[in-house]
Image (cartoon, rainbow, N blue to C red):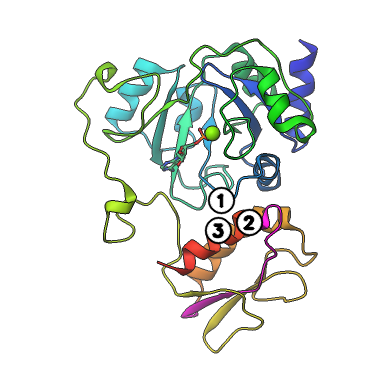
């Protein structure tokens, strides 16, 4: 199919492509390419960086990215390919950019059943990161026309394979906890589920780590480093590390989580970050920096 080949070529070039899955239409990009994944956020206009689901061809491919225990392997065997996403510990050296996991040490993985998404993963020959293909706060698209109406010219190619089957995002499971209900219900699972504790109800931060944050104090809008601080620069302010010397927000997004990890791992006691403009992807970058600063 010519459209699939073109889509795969665009993926390997670092572009995003909209593709149907059995849940909703996804906006896919190379999960190993930080700049390509930044392009997903740019196209969606997402005001914050949520970790994205990585789509792979089969269980063997998933096991190259994450560590499976017996429960996870049982779920994969029962429900893959299908609308079930597993949150698992990220394998050391897995070729996934930190922007996909939003800096976490876990990764959300799924083996989709839809022929278009399966075909695209095979043709591109790599794991694909894909959230729903709609503008931020929009409704999840179940038809190619929904994607076009929501994202329009911000997506270079939409693979149209009709309406999606489930029309509902995948069920997400971490351990024996359902993080997001979906097409596979608790009653379908081979074990009793444990209740999901909402993050807002947790008093000690980090108990439910759905967001990575550095352990060190982080100061925003810094023009220069104070004694003991590691400076993350932007634009004209260059630091120990610089998100983008050119002031490019997409480049900054692509480097953000690696930069935070490097700052945390440094020998300094604090982290300072230069001002980052709030337009476009800058909104999501500032959202993450703000959360990292106030915890
Ligand atoms: P979407 O890609 O738009 O379907 O959304 C993905 C969902 O998966 C979001 O609700 C994320 O918070 C969740 N998710 C992805 N990765 C993780 C992870 N490592 N830990 C917990 N939740 C995750
Ligand atoms: Mg969505």
Q: State the separation of the CA atoms marked 2 and 1.
A: 7 Å
Q: Secondary structure at mark 1?
A: loop
Provide residue 283's location: percent of width, then percent of height.
Answer: 63, 56
Ligand 2: quadrant of the figure:
top right
C-beta proximity under 8 Å, tags 2 and 1: yes
Quarter of the rendering occupied by the C terminus: bottom left
Rate crowding at label 1 as few (under 14), some (14 to 19) or many (20 or more) other CA atoms within 10 Å. Answer: some
Q: Position of residue 273 (x, y in %)?
A: 60, 73
- Density class for disc 3 (Cα within 10 Å; few <14, some 14-19, many ≥20) is some
Out of 187 and 9, give the one closest to the viewer: 187
Q: Which mark is residue 287?
A: 3
Q: CA distance from mark 2 to mark 3?
A: 6 Å
**Is there CB contact under 8 Å for labels 2 and 3?**
yes
Q: In the rendered structure, which segment of residues is drawn in magenta?
A: 267-282
Label 3: state its secondary structure. helix
Q: 80 or 21: nearer the eye?
A: 21
Q: Earlier in the sequence, mark 2 or mark 1?
A: 1
Label 1 beta carbon within 8 A of ligand 1: no
Q: Residues within 10 Å of mark 2 (few under 14, many from 20)?
A: some
| Residue to which mark 1 is pinned | 48
Rendered image quadrant of residue 117: top right
Return the residue found at the far left.
Answer: 192
Let me know if residue 70 is in the magenta part: no
The structure residue drawn at horizontal position 51% and vertical position 73%, both measured from the top left corner, is 266
Q: Main secondary structure of the magenta part?
A: loop
Residue 283 has which mark? Answer: 2
């Amino acid at each position: 199919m010519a459209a699939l080949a073109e889509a795969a070529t665009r993926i390997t070039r670092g572009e995003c492509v909209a593709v149907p899955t059995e849940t909703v239409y996804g906006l896919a990009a190379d999960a190993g390419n930080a700049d390509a994944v930044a392009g997903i956020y740019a196209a969606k206009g997402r005001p914050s960086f949520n970790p994205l689901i990585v789509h792979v061809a089969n269980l063997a491919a998933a096991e190259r990215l994450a560590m499976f225990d017996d429960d996870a392997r049982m779920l994969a065997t029962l429900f893959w390919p299908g609308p079930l996403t597993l949150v698992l510990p990220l394998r050391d050296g897995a070729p996934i950019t930190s922007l996909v996991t939003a800096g976490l040490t876990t990764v959300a993985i799924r083996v989709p059943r839809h022929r278009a998404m399966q075909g695209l993963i095979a043709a591109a020959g790599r794991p694909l990161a894909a959230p729903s293909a709609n503008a931020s706060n929009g409704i999840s698209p179940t038809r190619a026309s929904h994607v076009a109406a929501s994202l329009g010219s911000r997506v270079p190619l939409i693979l149209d394979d009709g309406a999606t089957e489930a029309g509902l995002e995948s069920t997400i499971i971490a351990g024996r906890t359902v993080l997001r209900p979906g097409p596979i219900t608790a009653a379908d699972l081979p074990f009793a589920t444990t209740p999901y504790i909402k993050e807002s109800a947790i008093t000690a931060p980090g108990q439910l780590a759905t967001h990575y944050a550095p352990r060190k104090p982080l100061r925003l809008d810094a023009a220069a480093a104070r004694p003991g601080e590691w400076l993350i620069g932007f634009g004209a302010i260059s630091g120990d590390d610089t998100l983008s010397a050119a002031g490019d927000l997409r480049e900054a997004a692509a480097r953000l989580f690696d930069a935070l990890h490097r700052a945390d791992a440094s020998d300094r006691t604090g982290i300072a970050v230069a001002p980052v403009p709030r337009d476009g992807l800058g909104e999501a970058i500032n959202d993450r920096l703000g959360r990292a600063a106030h915890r």
